Image (cartoon, rainbow, N blue to C red):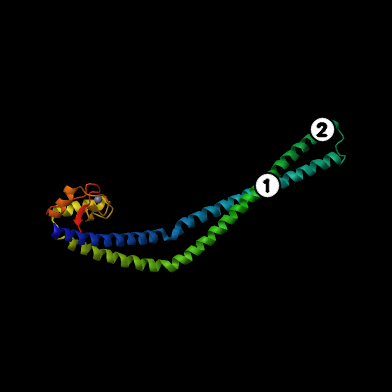
Amino acid sequence: MQLSGDLLLTLQEVDERLTKKQQQLDQLNAELEGQAEIPVLTERAEHERETSIERRAHLARLEVDADALRERVEELEERIYGGTVTNLRELTAVEEEQANARRELMQAEESLGPARLAAEDSERAKEELTTTLAERETTWAESAPKLRRQSRAAAKEVAVLEQERAEASKNVPADELMLYNQLLFRRHGVAIARVERGVCLACHITLPLKEASRLRRSDAIVTCGNCGRILIPS
Ligand SMILES: [Zn+2]
């Protein structure tokens, strides 16, 4: 047990470094792939630019409509008060038409305010996004080469550690290696636990006396009844 226990401990130590390095590499690659969110920001900026154009066009249409209605109201007022309409029935009809045009004008003017605000909001959002995007692009241009260098270096170190791992697992008995690998996966990278004064140092459970003495005497692998890890006496 002592011999393969040492082998497993060495393997665990290599695996810890390998896991850490692999995480570092994954992190670097994720950052490289994400490109500081530039593609997402570009898409959002483009969307905001389109929205801004649509809202400005909508506002312009509303303004044209309101102007036309204003003219129409004035025209009708001229007719009513200009003295050209003398027939009472015609006058009533023109007055009715003018009241309708006024109502429409009021409605058009009421919708102008919100439309103007919406257009301004959109314009502001577009400008903010464009600024953020420009800043990100500058930062990215500076940081990307460094990230790529770090990623390449980390990949090399991972390859070296994988080599080291192959070396360290070479002399571990096949069944122990299989158990170890399963535990490594199930126990998130820590397959081995040291035991001190009868306590598993991974899950802090006190081993039953029988197990503890088996661990001291036995040549076979003893696993923790609680966390399942391979136990190594201190
Ligand atoms: Zn345990």
Type of amino acid under label 2: Thr
In this picture, residue 159 sits left or right of residue 57: left
Q: Which mark is residue 112?
A: 1
The answer to whether mark 2 is within 8 Å of ligand 1 is no
Label 2: state its secondary structure.
helix
The quarter of the rendered structure image containing the N terminus is: bottom left
Q: Amino acid at mark 1?
A: Leu
Q: Badge 1: how crowded within 10 Å, few (<14), some, or many (20+)?
A: some
> Percent x, y for residue 54?
58, 50
Who's the residue at 53% across and 60% down the image? 130
**Mark 1 residue element:** helix
Q: Which mark is residue 92?
A: 2
Q: Residues within 10 Å of mark 2 (few under 14, many from 20)?
A: few
Q: CA distance from mark 2 to mark 1?
A: 30 Å
Q: Nearer the viewer, residue 192 or 86?
A: 192
The residue at the point 36 percent across, 66 percent down is 148
Judged left or right of residue 232, residue 140 is right
Q: Nearer the viewer, mark 2 or mark 1?
A: 1
